[in-house]
Amino acid sequence: MTFVVTSNCQRCRFTDCVAVCPVECFHGDKEMLYIDPDECIDCGACVPECPVEAIYDETEVPPEQIEWIEINAARASELPVVAETETPLPTAEERRKQLGFG
């Protein structure tokens, strides 16, 4: 079992989640973060830290987001680790509002 970053992270890239990750399993591109399923230890510490509720246990990913399980596995393996909190994207606050979070 692992955790999965879903489409809510797109155009946000809030990195609150990486600050609490004990194993540095987050990887990122210019648009969002991904979790490496081979590195994730299933602790779940990242879930409550995400301000846009983009992270799910792989067994609880909503049906319309199921493709993100494979996307995370594929993308994480080819991207650099993100282990420190960074400034969110300039579109993050607007995206958060569009998603219905504050």
Image: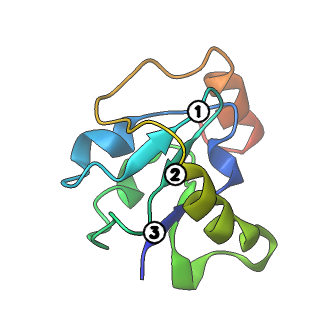
Q: Which residue is mark 1?
A: 29
Could you tell me which residue is drawn at 60 percent across and 38 percent down? 32
Find numbered disc 2 in the image and state the secondary structure of the residue it sits on: helix
Label 2, residues with CA under 10 Å away: few <14, some 14-19, many ≥20: many
| Marks 3/1: CA–CA distance | 18 Å
Could you tell me which residue is drawn at 53 percent across and 78 percent down? 58
For marks 2 and 3, the one nearer the N-term is 3
Q: How is the image coloured?
A: rainbow
Quarter in which the N terminus is drawn:
bottom left
Q: Which mark is residue 76?
A: 2
Q: Which mark is residue 13?
A: none
- Residue type pointed to by label 1: Asp
Whole-percent x and y of residue 18?
A: 33, 42
| Marks 2/3: CA–CA distance | 12 Å
Find numbered disc 3 in the image and state the secondary structure of the residue it sits on: strand
Q: Which residue is mark 3?
A: 3
Whole-percent x and y of residue 55?
A: 51, 59
- Residue type pointed to by label 2: Ala
Whole-percent x and y of residue 66?
A: 72, 74
The quadrant holding residue 45 is: bottom left
Q: Is residue 6 above or below residue 65?
A: above
Left or right for 36, reference 94: left
Q: Nearer the viewer, mark 2 or mark 3?
A: 2
Which residue is more in the foreground, 75 or 59?
75
